[in-house]
């Protein structure tokens, strides 16, 4: 039987796969800290998939992470990565900014989206505040709301998904969430003791995996994958893969058949020799 692995799955996973995340959203996801040794033995996985995870890893740990993916993949197995495409972002930003006029707001959004995810100090950051502003005047902001959806896959019009039960019952059912809340209280207490200038400029209280630690383009990721021993690094799309019966939906395509993570993601696959 094939072993299919999803690293840093968040709430997007396939039942029957081995799904891992720091904060499991369901019993189909195992809790793991994925920055060190991955919780699988050597050469076990036929497919290792990871979407919008690698850009959250501190850059000095990225080659270690890719080596771990190499270690757990079988010979002939495939690693599929999905992540923001820095080259595409730069191209789109420059062309919007240089068009000027009404395109400036879109260029401003791309700056906000990329920079805020790197530097925010509180959960949601400036991006959440911007989304709230768009949503407060949806009829006047139709073009920007559509631009956000097309770029990021995030649909500001979509109804907010709520998990069953109230906040407390959800918390009690998931002991990791209780530990996480206690951790947050503890961290906030410690941080409040720091000198305020240091705190304001250097300390971030965002969630694990919320901030981007680095950005990549095809060339930089290809070099990292080849260095780790992978071969045949190929660019794919949200709807193409060399993996047989790849579950495009829910992983890379949403229920409307559109790229789940919008136009700014790149998709690549590499083979373990
Ligand atoms: C941006 S989300 C991507 C989720 C999903 N793969 C997707 O494509 O929508 C990043 C995920 O990585 C997880 N994550 C970040 N750092 C982690 C770590 N050190 N160990 C385990 N999971 C981590 C976060 O909990 C979060 O669910």
Image (cartoon, helix red, strand yellow):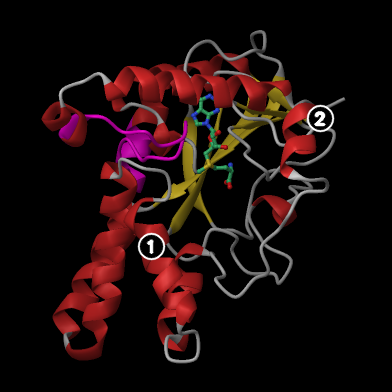
18 on left or right of 183: right
Q: CA distance from mark 2 to mark 1?
A: 32 Å
Quadrant where the C terminus sits is: top right
Tell me: residue 19, above or below residue 89: above
267 on left or right of 73: left
**Location of residue 110 in the rendering, given as x and y in whole percent from the top left corner:** 30, 65
Dot 2 and dot 1 residues touching (CB under 8 Å) = no
**Residue 236 visible (yes or no):** yes
Question: Residue under circle 2?
Answer: 27
Question: Residue under circle 1?
Answer: 129
Q: Which residues are magenta?
A: 201-223
Q: Which of 94/137 is in front?
A: 137
Give residue 31's quadrant in the image: top right
**Location of residue 8 in the rendering, given as x and y in whole percent from the top left corner:** 58, 33
- Residue drawn 37% across the image and 53% down it: 85
Q: Earlier in the sequence, mark 2 or mark 1?
A: 2
Q: What secondary structure do most residues of the magenta stretch adopt?
A: loop
Tell me: residue 126, above or below residue 230: below
Give residue 197's quadrant in the image: top left
- Residue drawn 46% across the image and 66% down it: 263
């Amino acid at each position: 039987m094939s072993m299919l692995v999803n690293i840093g799955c968040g709430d997007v996973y396939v039942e029957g796969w081995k799904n891992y995340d720091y904060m499991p959203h369901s019993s189909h996801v195992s809790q793991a800290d994925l920055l060190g040794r991955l919780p699988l033995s050597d050469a076990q996985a036929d497919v290792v998939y990871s979407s919008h995870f690698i850009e959250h890893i501190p850059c000095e740990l990225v080659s270690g992470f890719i080596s771990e993916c190499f270690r757990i993949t079988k010979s002939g197995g495939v690693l599929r990565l999905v992540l923001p495409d820095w080259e595409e972002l730069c191209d789109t930003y420059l062309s919007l900014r240089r068009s000027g006029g009404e395109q400036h707001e879109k260029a401003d959004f791309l700056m906000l989206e990329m920079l805020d995810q790197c530097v925010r100090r509180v959960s949601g950051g400036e991006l959440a505040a911007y989304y709230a502003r768009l949503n407060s005047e949806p009829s006047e902001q139709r073009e920007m709301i559509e631009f956000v959806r097309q770029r990021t896959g995030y649909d500001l019009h979509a109804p907010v998904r709520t998990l069953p039960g109230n906040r407390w019952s959800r918390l009690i059912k998931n002991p990791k969430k209780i530990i996480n809340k206690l951790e947050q209280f503890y961290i906030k207490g410690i941080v409040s003791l720091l000198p305020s200038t240091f705190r304001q400029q250097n300390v971030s209280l965002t969630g694990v995996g919320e901030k981007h630690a680095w950005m990549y383009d095809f060339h930089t990721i290809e070099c990292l994958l080849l260095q780790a021993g992978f071969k045949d690094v190929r660019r794919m799309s949200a709807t193409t893969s060399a993996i047989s019966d790849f579950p495009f939906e829910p992983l890379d395509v949403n229920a409307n058949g559109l790229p789940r993570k919008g136009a700014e993601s790149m998709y690549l696959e590499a083979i373990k020799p």
